[in-house]
Image (tube, rainbow, N blue to C red):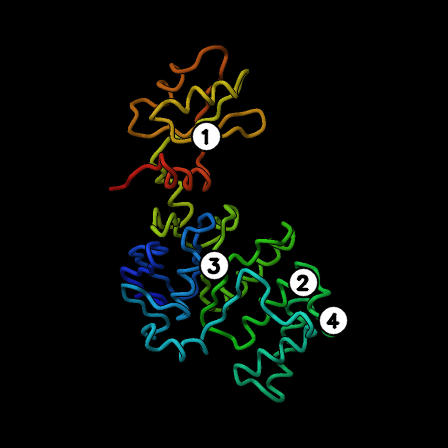
Amino acid sequence: MADVVIQASGLTRKFTDVTAVNALDLRVERGQIYGFLGPNGCGKSTTIRLLTGLLTPTEGEVEVLGYVLPKQAEALRQKVGYMTQQFSLYQDLSVVENLRFVARIYGITGAEQQQRIEQLLQQYHLENKAERRASALSGGQRQRLALAAAVVHNPQLLFLDEPTAAVDPENRRDFWERLFDLSDAGTTILVSTHYMDEAERCHRIDILEQGHKRAEGAPEQLMQELPCEVFELRGDGLRNVRKQLMQEQAVLSTAQIGQSLRVLVNKQQQQPQQWLEQQLSGEIDVQAVRPSLEDVFVANTGTRHVSRD
């Protein structure tokens, strides 16, 4: 039987007349990298704060690492790491001073502290930046420092709230390699993102919109189960073609990518490729293509999302 690290049922958080998280059910197993995918304001950060005990649920039940929240939130905090969206360490302290400060918070002192910090400086390639103030670090270096601080106490569970939002692609790739190292060593990771390529790296994802879970599963599974057919159109006048197709109820989305137009057609439409070709005039080539995770996201969110009810 799988070792469940996070179990939530009907998790809800309301702020006056706004429901930020709406009846969320969640199950995360040990060692997984579990992703929340969604736009700003969809409830990702609020959910993470609920799961770390920083917020109290309005309704629902949640258990993390065997601790019942919010009752046992204080005990849980010693077992988890949390990396926020914004760099939250001290800008006027050096890299090593920040790590010492965080280590002391978790009761790591003396020789154990020195050994752990030396290990982290080497692991996250910060040895030659150890005495540099955090304010003088590049974006990628700050990110590595923030991750090192979040795992200084070897947490069983790591929460990352849009950790790569202001980092270049090369540093993002390097950051994810480090996450897989942690996962391989047994650390469970819950990460929120609005980058499709990052979500595709997760073992499982939740697609969130306005506090609701729209879809859940392994990225490859969600792409295979996409409730629409995906087509690539090539030819002249694609901007006009796009305007025309968006008038059709069966068309969920159109997006121009270079010299082609990507079109999602609801599977409920009979013979979708033949139907699509009949809507077009002129020399437009229509080819069925493999779905992407972005297609999954589009099909499950927005005003035209495919209802699974």
Query: Left or right: where does residue 72 sit relative to residue 141?
Result: left
Circle 2: element type: helix
- Which is nearer the N-term, disc 4 or disc 3? 4
Query: Left or right: where does residue 172 sit relative to residue 156?
Result: right
Image quarter of the N terminus: bottom left
Residue at point 42% right, 65% down? 49
Circle 1: element type: loop
Which of 141/118 is in front? 141
Residue 141 numbered tag: 2
* Residue type beneath disc 4: Arg
Question: Can you identify the residue that label 1 sits on?
Answer: 289
Residue at point 58% right, 67% down? 88
Question: Can you identify the residue that label 3 sits on?
Answer: 191
Q: Would you say the residues marked 2 and 1 are in contact, meaning their CB atoms lie under 8 Å apart?
A: no
Task: Tell me the quarter of the picture where residue 147 sits.
Answer: bottom right
Residue 138: image x %, image y %? Answer: 70, 60
Circle 3: element type: strand
Residue 181: image x %, image y %? Answer: 54, 64
